């Protein structure tokens, strides 16, 4: 089974729990990773904490603080929804269905590869 909080970050979720700004604690910190001066000297990484649940999200996907704030709130909303609803959450259900689709696609690709191998072997036997 999937760890619940790792299922977050799916875009099409509809019935998410609403977050109030009073429940959030926001910090701006320096990001890390590649980027040199662009990341090392600017505080554009957003750390968002949901106080009732204790869930923390760190977002440093863009150089824009406003975009990072928006993305962090979206991710936090999905994680809080998963935290409270568990397997009944739309985010979890979407993750499960996409996982099944991925496995089915993998299975079909494997079958096609086997068919191609058999076909090549038959061609080799016909040549001999």
Image (cartoon, rainbow, N blue to C red):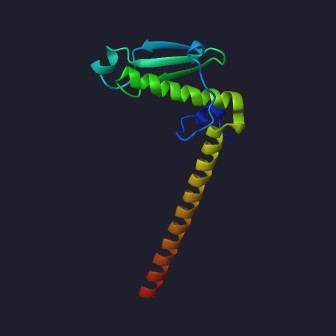
Above or below, comparing residue 17 to residue 22 in the picture? below
Q: What residue do we see at 56% from left, 52% from top?
A: 102
Q: What residue do we see at 67% from left, 28% from top?
A: 83
Above or below, comparing residue 116 to residue 22 in the picture? below
Q: What residue do we see at 65% from left, 31% from top?
A: 82
Q: Is residue 35 left or right of residue 70?
A: left
Nearer to us in this view, 122 or 66? 66
Above or below, comparing residue 12 to residue 86 in the picture? below
Which corner quadrant of the image does residue 56 belong to?
top right
Q: What residue do we see at 56% from left, 63% from top?
A: 108
Q: Is residue 117 left or right of residue 1?
A: left
Image location of residue 53, percent across then percent down? 66, 19
Image location of residue 97, percent across then percent down? 62, 49
Please say whether residue 105 is visible from this viewpoint. yes
Nearer to us in this view, 83 or 128? 83
Please say whether residue 128 is visible from this viewpoint. no
Which corner quadrant of the image does residue 1 belong to?
top right
Q: Quadrant of the C terminus?
A: bottom left
């Amino acid at each position: 089974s999937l760890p619940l909080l790792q299922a977050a970050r799916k875009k099409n979720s509809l019935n998410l729990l609403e977050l109030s700004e009073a429940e959030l604690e926001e910090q701006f910190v320096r990001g890390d990773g590649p980027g040199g001066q662009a990341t090392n000297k600017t505080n554009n990484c957003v750390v968002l904490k949901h106080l009732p649940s204790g869930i923390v999200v760190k977002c440093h996907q863009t150089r824009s603080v406003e975009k990072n704030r928006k993305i962090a709130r979206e991710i936090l909303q999905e994680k809080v929804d998963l935290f409270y609803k568990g397997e009944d959450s739309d985010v979890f259900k979407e993750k499960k269905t996409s996982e099944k689709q991925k496995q089915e696609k993998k299975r079909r690709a494997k079958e096609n590869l086997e068919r191609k191998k058999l076909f090549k072997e038959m061609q080799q036997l016909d040549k001999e």
